[in-house]
Amino acid sequence: MKKIMKLAFLMSAIALVISACSASKNTVTGTPNVSRGKFTGTWTISTVTYESLVENAVQTVFDQGPPASFVGSTWNLTNSGNGTYTMSNGTAQKIFWSVNNATSNGQAFQFKKIYEGEKPKNVAEGYQLVVASNDGNTMVLKTPIAIGSTGTGYVVYTFAKK
């Protein structure tokens, strides 16, 4: 009986250690997962930079235009998941967004474009960006871009909350 109790205690201790060490950290950046509430609000992309990529190597993002064309775009994200982004040239796009805490790259911001008459549940394709940071006032999201067969570069978007 003592051996069974010792074994049960040992198994419980191991399970506790494993759960205590499990990640609530983003595996790419080491930043903690950010609550959904910190994403809601009106955001403006202030800069677009490149990480491990040559500038202008990416011609189109979000099937919309070059990354630089998103500088100055305004993103309105409601708590319900509905949202819009408006480019500086006036082009507006409805989206449905969410935060995914269970990706291989850590926490991700994901969205689907929604067109007239569509429902988000019927849209299968979308975009997923790695959450590098979000303190509620400044947010950095990164679009992963495959480099050859072994590497990944990123288009990095820095958002400022209005």
Image (cartoon, rainbow, N blue to C red):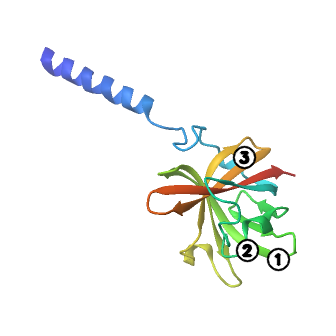
Q: Secondary structure at mark 3?
A: helix
| Rendering coords of residue 111 (x, y %) | 63, 65
Q: CA distance from mark 3 to mark 1?
A: 25 Å
Residue nearer the viewer, 38 or 151 = 151
Q: How many neighbours does mark 2 have within 10 angstroms: few (below 14), some (14-19), or many (20 or more)?
A: few
| Residue shown at the point (82%, 77%) measured from the top left | 91
| Rendering coords of residue 112 (x, y %) | 63, 70
Question: Which residue is disc 1 drawn over?
Answer: 91
| Residue shown at the point (31%, 26%) measured from the top left | 14
**Disc 2 or disc 1, which is closer to the eye?**
2
| Rendering coords of residue 156 (x, y %) | 69, 54
- Which quarter of the image is occupied by the N terminus? top left
Q: Which mark is residue 155?
A: none
Is residue 132 shown above or below 23? below
Q: How many neighbours does mark 1 have within 10 angstroms: few (below 14), some (14-19), or many (20 or more)?
A: few
Q: Quadrant of residue 121?
A: bottom right
Q: Are marks 3 and 1 in contact (CB under 8 Å)?
A: no
Q: Which mark is residue 65?
A: 2
Amino acid carrying mark 1 in the image: Thr
Residue nearer the viewer, 66 or 160 = 66
Q: CA distance from mark 2 to mark 1?
A: 11 Å
Q: Are marks 3 and 2 in contact (CB under 8 Å)?
A: no
Amino acid carrying mark 2 in the image: Gly
Taking the view exactly as shown, the residue that stands out farthest to the bottom is 117
| Rendering coords of residue 28 (x, y %) | 54, 44
Amino acid carrying mark 3 in the image: Lys
Taking the view exactly as shown, the residue that stands out farthest to the top is 2
Is residue 36 shown above or below 5? below
Q: Quadrant of residue 80?
A: bottom right
Q: CA distance from mark 3 to mark 2?
A: 27 Å
Question: Which residue is disc 3 drawn over?
Answer: 38
